[in-house]
Image (tube, rainbow, N blue to C red):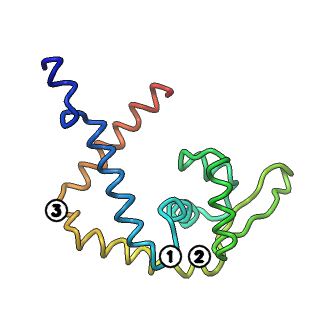
């Protein structure tokens, strides 16, 4: 590939991934708005719906978020009645984050709203399984680079 073509924006994989990420964030923002949730708050819920009662640092690690980013998100979710925070008995510096009954009850309606949006925008027409596999491989590659 010529150097000129390699530097064109529309030839950059990173730009297409960036645009896709931005579009997903916008789509999820619209779906989550009636629930008064941000995309990042939704990601926190996804982690806790899989495994409730996690240390805040473990949630951050799973999402790739630092404590400076995660703590305000958790605080807003506590204020909205979705999360509880308690000090760990093993480590007084650590906090266990858990779902409230409200967050547990919202699981199905939120997931249904997300699924309906994905179907309505014909996302399933894209080979989503292959795309997910390729993105996981790409992320694993970057993880090995220790960025």
Taking the image as shown, residue 95 lies to the left or right of residue 127, namely: right
In the rendered image, residue 18, in percent from the top left (x then y), is placed at 33, 44
Q: Earlier in the sequence, mark 3 or mark 1?
A: 1
- Tag 3 secondary structure: helix
In the rendered image, residue 4, in percent from the top left (x then y), is placed at 16, 21
Mark 1, residue position? 107
In the rendered image, residue 5, in percent from the top left (x then y), is placed at 14, 25
In the rendered image, residue 31, in percent from the top left (x then y), is placed at 39, 72
Residue at the spot x=63%, y=73% of the render? 82
Taking the image as shown, residue 33 lies to the left or right of residue 102, namely: left
Q: Is residue 37 above or below residue 39?
A: below
Taking the image as shown, residue 103 lies to the left or right of residue 85, namely: left
Q: Is residue 46 above or below residue 34?
A: above
Residue at the spot x=69%, y=63% of the render? 75
Residue at the spot x=26%, y=36% of the render? 13
Residue 83 falls in image quadrant: bottom right
Mark 2, residue position? 103
Q: Are marks 1 and 2 in contact (CB under 8 Å)?
A: yes
- Tag 2 secondary structure: helix
Taking the image as shown, residue 43 lies to the left or right of residue 4, namely: right
Q: CA distance from mark 2 to mark 3?
A: 31 Å
Within 10 Å of the Cα at label 2, are there few (<14), some (14-19), or many (20+) other Cα atoms? some
Residue at the spot x=50%, y=27% of the render? 146
Mark 3, residue position? 125
Within 10 Å of the Cα at label 3, are there few (<14), some (14-19), or many (20+) other Cα atoms? few
Q: Are marks 3 and 1 in contact (CB under 8 Å)?
A: no
- Tag 1 secondary structure: helix
Q: CA distance from mark 3 to mark 1?
A: 25 Å
């Amino acid at each position: 590939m010529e150097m000129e073509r390699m530097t064109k924006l529309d030839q950059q994989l990173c730009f297409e991934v960036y645009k896709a990420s931005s579009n997903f964030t916008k789509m999820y923002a619209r779906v989550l708005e009636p629930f008064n949730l941000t995309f990042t708050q939704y990601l926190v819920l996804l982690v806790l719906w899989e495994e409730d009662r996690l240390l805040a640092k473990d949630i951050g690690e799973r999402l790739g978020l630092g404590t400076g980013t995660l703590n305000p998100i958790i605080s807003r979710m506590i204020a909205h009645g979705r999360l509880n925070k308690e000090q760990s008995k093993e480590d007084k510096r650590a906090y266990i984050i858990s779902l409230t009954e409200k967050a547990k009850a919202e699981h199905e309606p939120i997931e249904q709203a997300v699924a309906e949006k994905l179907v309505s925008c014909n996302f399933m027409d894209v080979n989503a399984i292959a795309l997910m596999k390729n993105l996981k491989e790409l992320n694993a590659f970057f993880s090995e680079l220790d960025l």
